[in-house]
Amino acid sequence: MAKLSSNVIALFIVVALVCAFVPVLSIEEAEAKSLWDTCLVKITPKCALNIIAVVFGNGTLIESCCHDLVQEGKVCHDNLIKYIADRPSLIGRETQYLKKRDDVWIHCVSISKTA
């Protein structure tokens, strides 16, 4: 009887935790999606893919995309890259990607100032 009672209590705790955290996670995802949708309309798909390839791979930055990136704004750039870098498959390399993100931003701002 005590074992059954322990199992019921454990089940209740698990259900309570799931009910508590699922809405929080869905709100964060909704906010991230809203940010994603708001920011991505400020940059061409070609340039968005190019910048992602540079930050997360070995892509070569197309200089004409720097104008789009600077127009998109630093907040959007930072948040979009962080959103991608926070994916579970990329855990452990976030610092590397955030440094590349910052390097791309600095490079694009310097190009935009001289253009």
Image (cartoon, rainbow, N blue to C red):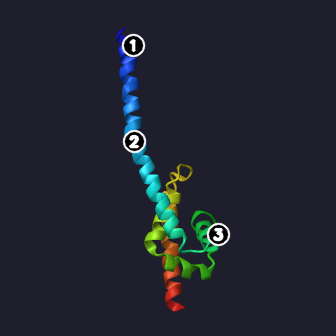
Amino acid at pointer 2: Phe
Given the current orientation, which residue lies at the most extreme bottom position? Answer: 115
Q: Nearer the viewer, mark 3 or mark 1?
A: 1
Residue 84 position, x and y percent, is 53, 59
Which residue is under mark 2? Answer: 21
Residue 41 position, x and y percent, is 54, 71
Gap between marks 1 and 2, in whole Å? 26 Å
- First in residue order: circle 1 vs circle 2: 1
Element class at badge 1:
helix
**Other residues around mark 3 within 10 Å, as few (<14) / some (14–19) / many (≥20):** few
* Residue 95 shows in the view: no
**Other residues around mark 1 within 10 Å, as few (<14) / some (14–19) / many (≥20):** few
Amino acid at pointer 3: Gly
Of 35 and 108, which appears nearest the observer?
Answer: 35
Gap between marks 3 and 2, in whole Å? 38 Å
- First in residue order: circle 3 vs circle 1: 1
Q: Which mark is residue 67?
A: none
Element class at badge 3:
loop
Of 107 and 73, which appears nearest the observer?
Answer: 73
Which residue is under mark 1? Answer: 4
Gap between marks 3 and 1, in whole Å? 58 Å
Residue 112 position, x and y percent, is 52, 86
